[in-house]
Image (tube, coloured by chain):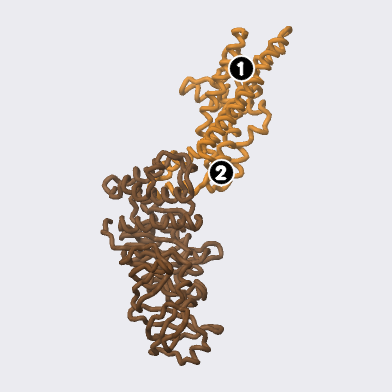
Chain colours: A orange, B brown
Amino acid sequence: MLTDAEWEALTLSFRIASVGVACALPFAVAIAYVLARVRLPGKTLLDGVVHLPLVLPPVVIGYLLLITFGTRAPVGGWLLETFGIRLVFDWKGAALAVAVVTFPFTVRAVRLSLEAADPELEAAARTLGAGRLDVFWTITLPQALPGVIAGAITAFAAGLGEFGAIITFVSNVPGETRTLPLAIFTAIQTPGGEAQALRLAMLSIALALAGLALAELAARRIRRRRGG
Amino acid sequence: MVLDVAIEKRLGGFRLDVAFAGERRGVTALFGASGSGKTATVRMIAGMSRPDRGHIRVDGRTFVDRAAGIDLPPERRRVGYVFQDAKLFPHLSVKRNLDYGLRRAPAGERRIAFDEVVGLLGIEGLLERRPHALSGGERQRVALGRALLAQPRIVLLDEPLAALDAARKAEILPFVERLRDEFGLAMLYVSHSLDEVVRLADDLVVLDGGRVRAAGPLVATMSRPELRDIVGVFDFGAVLEAAVVVHDDRYALTVLETPGGHLRVPRMDAPPGRRVRVRIRAVDAALALDPPVRASVVNVLMGRLTAVTPELGPGATARVDLGGAELVVAITRLSAERLGLAPGVPVYVMIKAVALDREEPARPRRRAPDRA
């Protein structure tokens, strides 16, 4: 049904989106915890910075990544020299772009479920002999789990569709950074590629819907188990 | 000294300045209206908030001492905290809720055993359930067990029955009594219910407006003059320690032996010989200089006036010594003058049996082996 190149784009999209979201998740949970629970001066600023990817044009994000992680840019150059890691023209760079772009989704979802959780449960756990970190792992995180899962699935679905940041930062390399949306873009640009573009577009829609349905299902299941 | 609290804290416009000491084990009730500072005080003992000044010591261990710069985090204080609404962990089964504190208690200090607590609380059948599948009363029983199994040095109960209806309260109270009797722990019981306090407490600390207004052994403290202002004229009264003599099923009465003689009360659910407490409100008693004849009041106790204190308005408080126990009787200043009521005068105290029906029979603590 799909050509080899199309399969490649599909599996690549999955790999990039899942790695990007998985790597961003711990940071997203940490930031969400700070925003929900810690009293901190400049919290509004942090909140703003976290939400920036939501309102910035993806091209700008890609550009910012390029001037930070490009091979001759400060961080990118250091990564290449020290670890031999090159992000531009590489799927790992695309994963980084996905991580940045989807970050606000995850932070928001986790933060909402942390704010809905009862801080008195944490106080109860402390009186029962659990230290701060212990409480975080055994009480706080399990309580936020519906948010973490829903946030991760939404971010994953959004990551599958990321276009602007990826093409700007890591370009459109077949088999390396050409994800589903980039393949659609390429098909449209190619004379006679309309049919292929349509097929891939339908596939994208199906994936996005499946992702959203999965997120809802997971959240419902957890809520039912807790009777909430 | 088991409990030594002397703390000050400013909470918005409210100033808390509380000092009391618990000399012995058993239940100390922290009594007061809502907003009197009870919960703020126990939260500081648990380490959930920190006093501005002062210290808290439990069993010789300093939990907090601002002058010395000591402030133990809650997890190192080892207090068993029972919240008003259970606060069970929703993502864990009942068994794992109970285990939470137990697993974190030092191995060498586990003297309260899982099976014993579960059996005492009657929650064997609930272990695999999740908290949301429990009734309010069951939840609170599990919460009691969870706090106890953390092997606490002191148990803090913050209005543990306030969220329950009367039937659930009656269901839980015997369990609190059992825990009190079986484990010989120090308990601080926060409540605004006089009935609960009378039923459970050995000692009483009365808070009002962020300050301790009265403190001491329960029976002696309940009838202190300060209590009249705090609980109100209609709830002010004395507590008598008594023993069940016999039940009179024909009239649904129970005869109690008190220091002042026999007292008939509405039928109690307690076997003969059982020690009980009865609270006798000052407004439910009246005085006579001669033995009343052909009166409907079934209880007439003999005693001697020790004090007659005029109050604001029409009232006066008479104190009667029954030979070791004291009753307070609300009378008018008019009667005090007409009858020439003064200290030393022998009087008959009339108590309406039906007026005593408003509360559950109270059962004071029986001596338990001191395990702690």
Q: Does B173 sit left or right of A69 as displayed?
A: left
Where disc 2 sits, the SS reads helix
| Tally of marks | 2
Of badges 2 and 1, the one in the foreground is: 2
In this figure, which residue is indicated by the disc labeled 1?
A: A179
Q: Quadrant of the C terminus of chain B?
A: bottom left
In this figure, which residue is indicated by the disc labeled 2?
A: A116
Residue B55 visible in the snapshot: no
Please provide percent x and percent y for residue A40.
54, 47
Residue B290 visible in the snapshot: yes
* Whether residue B3 is situated above or below residue B344 in the rendered picture: above
Where disc 1 sits, the SS reads loop
Query: Could you tell me the amino acid type at mark 1?
Result: Thr
Q: Does A13 sit left or right of A192 as displayed?
A: left
Who's the residue at 44% across and 51% down the image? B140
The quarter of the picture where residue A194 lies is top right
The quarter of the picture where residue A53 lies is top right
Q: Provide the chain ID for the residue under circle 2.
A: A
Please provide percent x and percent y for residue A88.
57, 20
Earlier along the polypeptide chain: callout 2 or callout 1? 2
Determine whether label 2 and label 1 are within 8 Å by CB.
no
Q: Provide the chain ID for the residue under circle 1.
A: A
Q: Quadrant of the N terminus of chain B?
A: bottom left
* Whether residue B263 is situated above or below residue A150 in the rendered picture: below
Query: Could you tell me the amino acid type at mark 2?
Result: Ala
